[in-house]
Image (cartoon, helix red, strand yellow):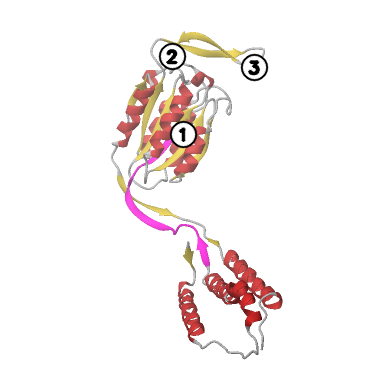
């Protein structure tokens, strides 16, 4: 909570002075022939006598706060630190449902480890690209990690045309990175298959990315040997699996990494994928300036209405219960 006009809050200091002067004045004295009838009323309603003054104080305090212009939000700031520009390119083709990372499938493990990787960032700028037979930017490069985490958790098989267009994924990710500030620009490409779709050759795309100083770290997701693969759906819509050989074009993934100065990793279990992200953590970082913006919202309405309510209550009491006697 901040105030647009904080100096107005100094007026609150007048209120204690007003109370002091009010109590320092001598109480008015009235002469009655017999005061015994007033004792009961005085004991029962003594606390009501000070209520109008308390309500008036609340009214003034609330209106002073409202006039100071309260606003809620977090101030924008420029922070200079070290970071990397990263795009996570995650395969969401149907083969990512293979359950060789029991009890989870490949996509669930890739999402879980990607979220853990994002949680460890502080100043790195990260984007997200999902790809299958085509590629789609889910989140442009940003430091809003909450949005990134939600987008990663929301990745689903079937949201894109099926297939594996590795070249298209590289081109989409590189296009997001080529204008990013800083010297360290990285694509982390997670896939479990071979290039089967797309008009852009993966090696050509990698060479083009290298011209922009982009390194590609390729990750082959899947165990060695055989794994339960989805082969279609049953009559009730459930996936049908069959144990098939795991086929990952490791030669292609190694060439992509080599052409860009990156590295190829094979993730055969969740822990291996975690270690891969830890190695990426140790990449060379460059100084960056991160600017955070926040939209402020005015909050004067609440104290304004509190003051109006207190004033109305005071007037009601003065007209009914606590009546001044001249």
Instruction: Please report the bounds of the magenta region as a residue range.
Output: 70-88
Q: Main secondary structure of the magenta part?
A: strand
Q: Earlier in the sequence, mark 3 or mark 2?
A: 3
Left/right placement of residue 180 relative to residue 163 reads: left
Q: CA distance from mark 3 to mark 2?
A: 26 Å
- Mark drawn on residue 90: none
Q: What residue is shown at x 56% (from left), y 74% (from top)? A: 54
Reading the image, the residue beneath label 2 is 247
Q: What residue is disc 1 on?
A: 171
Q: Nearer the viewer, mark 3 or mark 1?
A: 3
Badge 3 local density, few (<14 within 10 Å), some, or many (20+)? few
Residue 278 position within the rendered picture, expressed as x and y whole percent measured from the top left: 32, 32
Q: CA distance from mark 3 to mark 1?
A: 34 Å
Residue 48 appears in the picture as rendered: no
Mark 3 lies on residue: 237
Residue 204 occupies quadrant: top left
Q: Pointer 2: residues within 10 angstroms few (<14), some, or many (20+)?
A: some
């Amino acid at each position: 909570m901040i105030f647009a006009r904080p100096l107005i809050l100094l007026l609150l200091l007048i209120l204690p002075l007003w109370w002091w002067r009010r109590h320092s004045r001598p109480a008015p004295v009235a002469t009655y022939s017999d005061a015994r009838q007033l004792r009961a009323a005085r004991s029962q309603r003594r606390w009501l006598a000070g209520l109008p003054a308390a309500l008036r104080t609340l009214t003034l305090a609330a209106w002073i706060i409202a006039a100071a212009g309260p606003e809620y939000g977090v101030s924008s700031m420029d922070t200079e630190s070290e970071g990397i520009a990263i795009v996570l390119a995650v395969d969401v083709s149907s083969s990512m449902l293979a359950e060789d990372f029991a009890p989870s499938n490949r996509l669930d493990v890739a999402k879980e480890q990607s979220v853990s990787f994002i949680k460890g960032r502080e100043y790195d700028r990260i984007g997200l690209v999902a790809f299958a037979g085509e590629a789609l930017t889910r989140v442009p490069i940003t430091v809003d990690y909450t949005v990134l985490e939600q987008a990663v958790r929301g990745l689903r098989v079937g949201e894109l045309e099926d297939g594996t267009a590795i070249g298209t994924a590289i081109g989409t990710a590189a296009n997001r990175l080529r204008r990013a500030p800083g010297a360290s620009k990285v694509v982390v490409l997670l896939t479990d298959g071979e290039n089967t779709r797309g008009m852009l050759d993966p090696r050509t795309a990698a060479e083009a990315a290298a011209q922009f100083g982009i390194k590609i770290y390729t990750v082959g997701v899947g165990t060695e040997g055989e794994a339960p693969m989805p082969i279609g759906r049953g009559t009730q819509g459930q996936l049908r699996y069959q144990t098939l050989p795991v086929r990952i074009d490791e030669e292609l993934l190694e060439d992509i990494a080599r052409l860009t100065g990156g590295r190829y990793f094979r993730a055969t279990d969740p822990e291996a994928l975690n270690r891969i992200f830890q190695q990426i953590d140790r990449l060379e970082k460059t100084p960056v300036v991160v600017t955070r913006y926040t939209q402020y919202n005015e909050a004067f309405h609440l104290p304004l209405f509190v003051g109006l309510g207190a004033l109305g209550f005071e007037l009601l009491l003065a007209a009914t219960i606590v009546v001044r006697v001249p």
